[in-house]
Image (cartoon, rainbow, N blue to C red):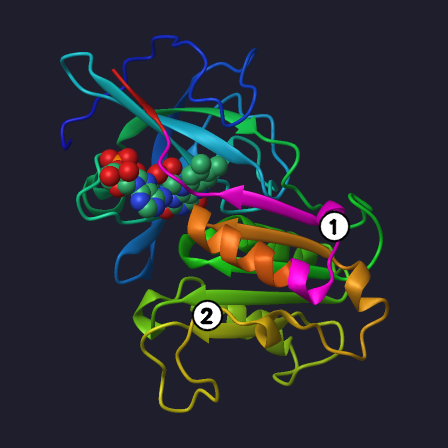
Amino acid sequence: MTDMRLSGAAVEDSHGTAPTSGKRWLKATLIGLHSQSRHSRTLAFRVPGWTGHAPGQHVDVRLTAADGYSAQRSYSLAEPSTTPDRVAITVDLLPHGEVSPYLVETMEIGDELDVRGPIGGWFTWTPGDPGIGPGPVLLVAGGSGVVPLMTMLLARKRAEDRTPTMLVYSLRGPRDLMYGRELSEMSVGRSGSRTESDPEVRLVYTRVVPETHPRPASHLRREDIALPSAWPAHLAARVFVCGSSSFVEHATGLLRAEGYPDDRIRTERFGPTGADR
Ligand SMILES: Cc1cc2nc3c(=O)[nH]c(=O)nc-3n(C[C@H](O)[C@H](O)[C@H](O)COP(=O)(O)OP(=O)(O)OC[C@H]3O[C@@H](n4cnc5c(N)ncnc54)[C@H](O)[C@@H]3O)c2cc1C
């Protein structure tokens, strides 16, 4: 799908990820591109009429070809909402996918598509908002599931929030790492050495491990999600898990085994989405 053009036509509600009634499709113009890994990139759009969003929410993206065929997919919002009329998404390439190759490899500055949102109010965390209760925050990401969790971390950083927070990020190998620079800066603070208010970041490599990394390659294990014992009320943490359905199943199984009650765990599944017409 390389010849997508904006149609601007209104379309019925999408694929049932969350209510979208009342949300209008808005024209989005690509204004920024930033490579994240060998197969993913962040795209920033100017979207007149965008009214802002909370960390963790997502957006529907619609591409429309010259013959009227359109395809839509969901993407998490990749930045906290600080600038009016701005939306950013980070897209991982699915090699034989329909939409992600266009967004990762083809779309150029000035190109347009449609967006609708923000969508979802359940999988959100905003600094200062008690949300699902007080306590530390545990973020568990599989692959591109790191995107909404990174937006939460960026919002936490901007607000200078000191809630004890840990990100556990499972990925295949170092070449798949997204937000490497931001994560390393964020987890060692301005001073260059980690302080108590900096988030703890644990990288879990499942296939290829960098030479200096202490943990051998394996899928996410129970000890990977164990919070530092020094943290207060560590089992009262709010937990956000995001990734493929199989990753979310695996991670929530480990969390339950670790003793987390279901009402502390919120999940977002990046399964296949979309309505093609
Ligand atoms: C709420 C939500 C938020 C999302 N946020 C992001 C995000 O921030 N970044 C991001 O890169 N993706 C995200 N996704 C996934 C995204 O919506 C698309 O599914 C993905 O980009 C693939 O689309 P495609 O058109 O390239 O592939 P398709 O043409 O839809 O699929 C091609 C093949 O791959 C399979 N497939 C589709 N999607 C996936 C998937 N995610 N994992 C494994 N197999 C799949 C399909 O079943 C099909 O066989 C999100 C999904 C949801 C539901």
- Dot 2: few (<14), some (14–19), or many (≥20) neighbours within 10 Å? few
Q: Residue 272: where, in percent of width, then height?
A: 35, 36
Mark nearer the viewer, 1 or 2: 1
Mark 1: which secondary structure? helix
Residue at position x 69%, y 46% in the image: 125
| Residue type marked 1 | Arg
Q: Report which residue position mark 2 lands on.
A: 181
Q: Mark 1 highlights which residue?
A: 264
Residue at image location 52% in from the left, 68% down from the top: 183
Q: Earlier in the sequence, mark 1 or mark 2?
A: 2
- The percent position of residue 145, horizontal first and vertical second, equals 47, 52
Q: Position of residue 133 (x, y in %)?
A: 83, 48
Q: Is residue 268 magenta?
A: yes
Secondary structure of residue under mark 2: helix
- 245 vs 195, nearest the viewer: 245
87 vs 217, nearest the viewer: 217
Q: Is residue 47 magenta?
A: no
Would residue 84 be visible to someone looking at this image? yes
| The residue stretch that appears in magenta | 256-273
Q: What residue is drawn where x is 59% and y is 71%?
A: 222
In the displayed structure, would residue 217 be above or below residue 254?
Answer: below
The CA span between labels 1 and 2 is: 30 Å
Ligand 1 lies in quarter = top left
Q: Quadrant of the N terminus?
A: top left
